[in-house]
């Protein structure tokens, strides 16, 4: 039986925020191991008054569904039921959501100052979205402009009594964490007493579902500049080279009342290059020699492109998925085994209707080493595909597969 939309959001809000912060923390740990400079930068940013968290590894990006919504989910770490969250004591101290800093040193700035805190002592640190204390309607600092060929320029997508959200600009991005595009976003909390999470998910670029990272907590009467990172294998493979059409969902949730109705839950479509809808082309999927087709019917396609050792992560399997329905689907590998040994790579994501996706399933070295696996000879798993927030009986696909690389 399908769940009522508002009820689903009430049940899932705490899971979504908690899971987001959890995987962001996990990813930061992995990035820190690979880059001393990145660690130094993060330490600088931690010292400022901000609830912003660094973005995550693209394969863990689907934070909305790391904890499934079904009532009959199992008891694995990433599959706690909504009732588990509802039973939590609201006054119980939590270590998963960072507390706002109260340090004198971090809060020594004039609330009427239009400069971003830290402007003088750490100019490069202010580039990446720190809060500033100026009133909502005061002039903004100088903003970056969009890349050549893009017309996105301070486009206001929401402006009401609760918030204002503006898309400032869009530029290509290629860093150690992301390959794709970054959209500079300005969020403003207009309320006098509400602490609000701003969360963007389900991003689609030119017909391809892509990884998106954007999660901000704003205090009353505050604003922030942040980057919506659009990344993933479709960019890395050159399937996507521009952002002509971008769609996404923006939701706002109260930090102090996770189960209250959300302030906003809305889908948006923008055209950063001003190309007309009928001129936008959906790139054809790459054809890979040796690919293995697991499912290909009138509703869903799943193809394993390739598998092999990734020296940085462990073992990596590249997968192409196509959702041919008009519904938001949740895709998961369950009961996953490597060489007959049970492992759980936490491979779960959602894909909007009528879109394509190229993604990677990663089995990290720590799990391979713990099970004395030196060579991956066989993968077997159950593919579970269903409309998001539906029960087992409504699943489109529940089927066991074996794959030999």
Image (cartoon, rainbow, N blue to C red):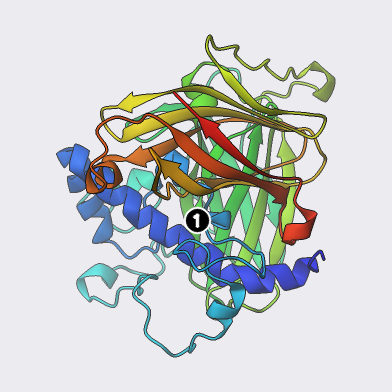
The residue closer to the viewer here, 291 or 64, is 291
Say left or right for 285 vs 319.
right
Q: Residues within 10 Å of mark 1 (few under 14, many from 20)?
A: many
Residue, x 54% and y 67% (percent of image)? Answer: 15
Say left or right for 245 vs 213.
right
Residue, x 81% and y 24% (percent of image)? Answer: 277
Q: Pinpoint residue 255: horizontal percent, then vertical percent.
A: 53, 74
Q: Where is the N terminus found, in terms of image quarters?
A: bottom right
The residue closer to the viewer here, 247 or 328, is 328
Q: Kindly state the secondary structure of the residue where label 1 is placed.
A: strand
Residue, x 30% and y 50% (percent of image)? Answer: 28
Q: Pinpoint residue 317: horizontal percent, then vertical percent.
A: 45, 29
Image-quadrant location for residue 131: bottom left
Q: Where is the C terminus found, in terms of image quarters?
A: top left
How many numbered marks appear?
A: 1
Q: Pinpoint residue 180: horizontal percent, then vertical percent.
A: 49, 28
Which residue extends farthest top?
A: 289
Image-quadrant location for residue 378: top left
Image-quadrant location for residue 149: top right
Residue holding disc 1: 215
The residue closer to the viewer here, 299 or 44, is 299
Q: Pinpoint residue 43: horizontal percent, then vertical percent.
A: 20, 54
25 over 83 or under it: above or below: above
70 over 212 or under it: above or below: below
Visible residue check, residue 115: no
Visible residue check, residue 239: yes
């Amino acid at each position: 039986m399908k769940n009522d939309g508002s009820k689903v959001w009430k049940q899932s809000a705490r899971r979504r925020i908690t899971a987001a912060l959890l995987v962001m923390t996990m990813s930061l740990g992995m990035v820190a191991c690979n880059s001393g400079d990145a660690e130094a930068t993060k330490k600088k940013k931690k010292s400022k008054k901000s609830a912003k968290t660094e973005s995550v590894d693209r394969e863990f990006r689907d934070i909305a569904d790391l904890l499934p919504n079904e009532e009959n989910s199992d008891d694995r770490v990433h599959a706690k039921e909504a009732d588990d969250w509802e039973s939590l004591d609201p006054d119980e101290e939590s270590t998963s959501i960072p507390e706002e800093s109260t340090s004198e040193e971090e809060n020594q700035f004039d609330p009427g100052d239009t400069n971003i805190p830290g402007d003088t002592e750490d100019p490069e640190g202010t580039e990446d979205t720190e809060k500033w204390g100026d009133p909502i309607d005061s002039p903004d600092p100088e903003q970056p402009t969009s890349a050549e060929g893009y017309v996105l320029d301070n486009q206001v997508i929401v402006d009401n009594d609760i918030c204002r959200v503006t898309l400032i600009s869009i530029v290509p991005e290629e860093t150690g964490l992301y390959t794709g595009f970054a959209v500079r976003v300005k969020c403003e909390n207009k309320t006098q007493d509400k602490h609000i999470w701003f969360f963007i998910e389900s991003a689609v670029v030119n017909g391809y579902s892509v990884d998106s990272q954007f999660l901000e907590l704003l205090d009353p009467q505050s604003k922030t500049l942040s980057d919506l990172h659009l990344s993933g294998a479709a960019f890395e493979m050159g399937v996507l080279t521009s952002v002509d059409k971008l769609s996404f969902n923006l939701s706002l949730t109260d930090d102090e009342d996770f189960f209250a109705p959300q302030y906003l839950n809305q889908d948006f479509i923008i055209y950063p290059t001003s190309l007309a809808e009928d001129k936008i082309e959906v790139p054809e999927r790459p054809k890979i020699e040796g690919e293995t087709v697991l499912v290909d019917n009138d509703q869903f396609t799943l193809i394993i492109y390739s598998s092999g050792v990734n020296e940085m992560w462990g073992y990596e399997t590249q997968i192409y998925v196509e959702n041919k329905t008009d519904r938001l689907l949740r895709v998961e590998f369950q009961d996953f085994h490597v060489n007959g040994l049970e492992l759980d790579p936490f491979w779960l994501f959602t894909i909007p209707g009528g879109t394509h996706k190229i993604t990677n399933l990663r089995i990290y070295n720590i799990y391979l080493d713990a099970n004395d696996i030196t060579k991956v000879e066989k993968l077997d798993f159950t593919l579970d595909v269903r409309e998001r927030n539906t029960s087992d009986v409504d699943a489109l696909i529940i089927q066991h597969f074996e794959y030999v690389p």
